[in-house]
Image (cartoon, rainbow, N blue to C red):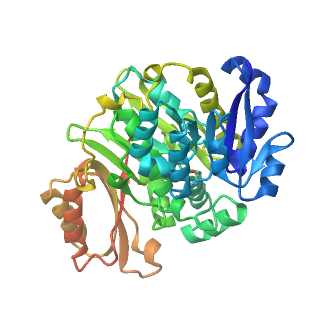
Amino acid sequence: MKPIQVGLLGAGTVGSGTFKVLLRNQEEIKRRAGRGIEITMVADLDQARAREVAGEGVKVVSDARAVIANPDIDIVIELIGGYGIARQLVLEAIAAGKHVVTANKALLAVHGTEIFAAAHAKGVMVAFEAAVAGGIPIIKALREGLTANSIQWLAGIINGTTNFILSEMRDKGLDFATVLKEAQRLGYAEADPTFDIEGIDAGHKVTLMSAIAFGIPVQFDKAHIEGITKLAAQDIKYAEQLGYRIKLLGITKRTAQGIELRVHPSLVPSKRLLANVEGAMNAVVVHGDAVGTTLYYGKGAGSEPTASAVIADLVDITRLHTADAAHRVPHLAFHPDAMSDLKVLPMAEVVTSYYLRLRVADQAGVLAKVTGLLATAGISIDAVLQREADEVGGEGSTQTDLIILTHDAREGTVNDVLAELQALPTVLQPIVRIRKEELS
Ligand code: HSE
């Protein structure tokens, strides 16, 4: 059978890896897919770059629409990124009856409902393994491998840039700004790192996983997102003294009240495998009612790791594209007419535990006042650590740090009590609040 023909939009790092891996492993890929898979056309505004990536015999164009218009192309890979032209081209490719493979988490997290509906109506597949955690086959695991389960929760380190920064801050005791500069110098962080450090990239990824885990629509606008820019080296150190590491987690949970969907720095017990995922690596823990807790670990970005996910999608489509559309795995794991309308909870309704750091005047009655207000609000204390004033503020200091770990509490209640604590004259600086996840 003649090879299936693929058109590539965007010949950057991942596109180049896709060419290399397809070529290197072509025989095995063919044995798995049942026929060859060939990228026969590439579109990129940078023609020289595209020619170098594509090699001999591949048609290189600057106009992506020429790829979409080519009747010989069955699958379009979108590696342009962003919500702008990429959205338009993906919708046009679907309208032209092409299957689409994309690594574009931003596009699907924001416009997924529109894109999946268009693909469903046209009977084509939109595959996006590469959009979440790079080379880790987490979409496949959630959508197919764990299909027997009622998934209860998942939590992931799904942004390598921020995990690298946090690992460096902990290892070297450095502050955020210093490590960010170093990460940019080493190429781990982009010149404009906003999407990574503000948690937006992780928010896109957890939004997609949440939809697949619980059969809800993609709702990035409902996700609560906080990045790592305000984290202080001091809190990483105190957390360590209490037996925790701080990680940027994407978390989604099923509760009786609705779905939690959130990204923020979290204390994780040091003994958990997730706490020991270091550098730019990614990992996702998924808890299903039947299987229990499972862990997926690997490279979340990079040329060939991401190409590994792109090609897995190409193989899936090659195997299934002649099948009746109704017999394919649904885009979001659940059949479109069987999606749930479970609501995504506002952050104030989320229940979790907390690390609080208060810079206080080192005088009689301060600890009692603080714990008294927490008790009145019904917030139970798990552990308290108080540093010696000299250690915190130097010789003769009259200030100290009070670190409190709480048991589970409703975020709205915690917000109220933090406002009361902040108003105390003996609380001298803005209170630091970091959420804590036991992941047990
Ligand atoms: N910038 C992402 C990261 C990879 O640092 O993990 C692509 O989503």
Foreground pick, 339 / 377: 339
Residue 16 in picture, x, y percent from top left = 75, 45
Q: Relative to 142, is 277 above or below? A: below
Q: Is residue 236 visible?
A: yes
Q: Is residue 248 visible?
A: no
Q: Residue furthest left?
A: 376
Left or right side of 432 for 372: left
Residue 173 in picture, x, y percent from top left = 58, 64
Residue 245 in picture, x, y percent from top left = 48, 51
- Residue name at image x 55 percent, y 37 percent: 129
- Residue name at image x 80 percent, y 47 percent: 53
Total marks shown come to 0
| Quarter the N terminus occupies | top right
Foreground pick, 77 / 183: 77
Left or right side of 113 for 160: right
- Residue name at image x 65 percent, y 51 percent: 64
| Quarter the C terminus occupies | top left
- Kindly indicate the quadrant of the structure image that contains residue 374: bottom left
Foreground pick, 31 / 39: 39
Left or right side of 202 for 369: left
Residue 302 in picture, x, y percent from top left = 68, 47
- Kindly indicate the quadrant of the structure image that contains residue 393: bottom left
Left or right side of 26 for 331: left
- Residue name at image x 23 percent, y 73 percent: 364
Q: Relative to 290, is 229 above or below? A: below
